[in-house]
Amino acid sequence: MVSGLEVIGFDRGLMGLSLAVHIILASLAMALPLLMVLSEFIGIKRNDKDFTIFAKRISKPFLVFLGVGTASGILIAINILVLWPKFMSLVSQVAILPFNFETIAFFMESLFVAVYFFSWGKLKRKYTHVLLGIPVVIGGALSAVFITMINAFMNTPVGFNKALYLANGTISNINPWAVFTSPSAANEILHVVGTTYFMGISIVLGYLAIRFLKTKNQKEKTYYKKIIWMLLILAAIFIVWSVITGMTSASSVYAQQPEKFAAIEGDLHPMTYAPEIIGGFPGANGTLKDYFKIPDLQSILAAGKPSGAVPGLSQYNPDTYPPLFIHFMFDFMVIVGTGIAFILLLIIFLRIIKKNPLSRKITSISLVVSGIFSILLVENGWIMAESGRQPWIIYNIMRVSQAANPSPSVIPVAIAIAAFYIFIIPLSIFILKLIFRNKPLDKDLKSRAK
């Protein structure tokens, strides 16, 4: 006999798997149209058909990932409705508008995707087709923006009388528009958009670096070099964007979710002149030992001054402590994010001083490694952010255990959904191989020369 607690644990595991896979699909579905439209624009502007070829070639993966991403999004909606009914009961009354607007953004994206693809090569004015692709880019970005607003609502709930809801479960004084301006929305949106674009672009960059390493065809090498440099600049822009918005998010978490902040920083007790704690090992009574520290930096990031007071977990109810492993996840995020930023900026710097870094095999290998670690980085960041809100699904309003469906009847459906997510990435790769089997790059490059 399966207990309710075991089912809740199963629900959480399935939701984690679903979101982990969906994040990869969504990042590619969001980044590929940006690369597609920008490449087409550069190809026209420079009269360089290599960029136009790249735009056309990535349009096929974009359609694949848009399709599987849509299916994945539908399944996640089913997950939420089936596994977290009490959560959706509250959200549907207070914060449903971002879901509605996300649907509108998706419809806009889908409409212009059809127009963009069927009008390729059929328009007389050379930039008209590029303009038709811009709503595709905007639609994908807006979908991320509106979904992130729901997550921001979970971190800083607004739009209803919270005290009355906690007292007797009554939902009153509803303001459905408040969700668009919740206290954490702006920071979250900027950070999520930046990291999503970064991951999607880094995956493509890593793949192109592999192809550049493997090919012996000089025309293909020239083609890959051009595209890699474009993607390198974009990836560097978005990783710097992500670092900056991540730093501003630290002060946001400090003000709005102090328990999460204390757990991330590894602070057991409140303090002033707080150092930034990196690494360490668990010690007695939940403390850390043998860690590296940067004096006063934590206080500066949190409060804007070296003497700023920071919270400690001892101030709060132990029943609402976030899991302390998020401190190590934060360290991973900082170290890996800084490392990737350094690699990308170093390669660009070497190019500026005319050292031709792509002539060295180590450069391509580092781009492949950066692409792999970009996935780990973003997935780690999401796990850290969501685990840091525990035990709450809606901060200080509803616990995960209160929101979940404890019925064992959901398990068969959930297993079927889990199977979909386990196979969807390999299936997508298999489909793309079938698509490109009869369309090798060399064939496109030869047709360019005609």
Image (cartoon, grey):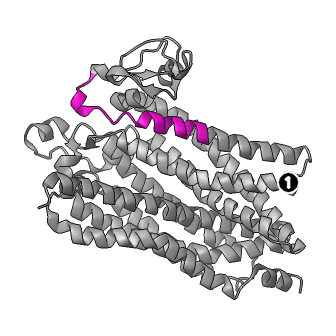
Q: What percent of the width, then of the height, locates residue 342?
A: 71, 40
Q: Is residue 119 visible?
A: no
Q: Is residue 282 left or right of residue 376?
A: left
**Magenta stretch: helix, strand or loop mostly:** helix
At horizontal 76% and vertical 60% (from top left) the residue drawn is: 228
Secondary structure of the residue carrying numbered label 1: loop
Residue 115 vertical placement versus 73 (above, below): below
Residue 72 image point, x, y percent: 41, 69
In the rendered image, which quarter contains the C terminus?
bottom right
The image quarter in which residue 21 lies: bottom left
Q: Position of residue 62 (x, y in %)?
A: 58, 72
Residue on which disc 1 sits:
360
Q: Is residue 381 magenta?
A: no
Residue drawn at the location 7% of the way across and 41% of the way down: 168
Q: In the rendered image, which quarter contains the N terminus?
A: bottom left
Q: Which residues are magenta?
A: 316-336
Q: Amino acid at mark 1?
A: Arg
